[in-house]
Image (cartoon, grey):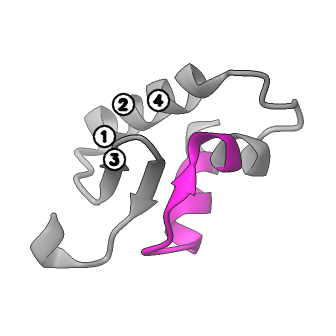
Amino acid sequence: MEFDVLLFLVSNPNIAFTKEQIYEAVSRDTYSEASYVIKDVVYRLRNKLELQCIQTLHGYGYKFSTDKSAV
């Protein structure tokens, strides 16, 4: 799922997505309050790849930022 989340965000740069939108785009399951799954995947991606370009939008979700000044 990590690769799928990363691919989804990188393929849609600078667009904000809710955790639900990300989950439904990369999973065959329905969301059903599984926001912790996306949160954990983003955490692992940031640690493994040392990514600072995945921005957390508090109260909303995440986006992949190509803006170097925001990173």
Mark closest to the chain's N terminus, 1 or 3: 1
Q: Which of pointers 4 and 2 indicates the residue nearer the eye?
A: 4
Q: Are marks 4 and 2 in contact (CB under 8 Å)?
A: yes
68 or 20: which is nearer to us?
A: 20
Residue 31 in the image: state x and y as whole percent: 78, 30
Mark identifier at residue 56: 3
Mark closest to the chain's N terminus, 1 or 4: 4
Magenta segment range? Answer: 5-21
Q: Is residue 68 left or right of residue 24?
A: left
Q: Which of pointers 3 and 2 indicates the residue nearer the eye?
A: 3
Q: Which of pointers 1 and 3 indicates the residue nearer the eye?
A: 3
* Structural distance between the alpha carbons of marks 3 and 2: 10 Å
Residue under label 2:
43
Residue under label 4:
39
Q: Is residue 24 left or right of residue 64?
A: right
Q: Are marks 1 and 2 in contact (CB under 8 Å)?
A: yes
Disc 3 marks a residue whose amino acid type is Thr
* Structural distance between the alpha carbons of marks 1 and 3: 11 Å
Disc 2 marks a residue whose amino acid type is Tyr
Residue under label 1:
46
Q: Based on the picture, tell me whether residue 70 belongs to the magenta stretch.
A: no
Graded by Cα atoms within 10 Å as few (under 14), some (14 to 19) or many (20 or more), the crowding at tag 4 reads some
Q: Which of pointers 1 and 4 indicates the residue nearer the eye?
A: 4
Residue 21 in the image: state x and y as whole percent: 69, 50
* Structural distance between the alpha carbons of marks 1 and 2: 5 Å
Mark closest to the chain's N terminus, 3 or 4: 4
Circle 3 sits in a helix, a strand or a loop, which is it?
Answer: strand
Q: Please tell me which residue is depicted at 58% across the width and 72% down the height of the picture.
A: 11
The quadrant where residue 48 appears: top left
Mark closest to the chain's N terminus, 3 or 2: 2
Circle 4 sits in a helix, a strand or a loop, which is it?
Answer: helix
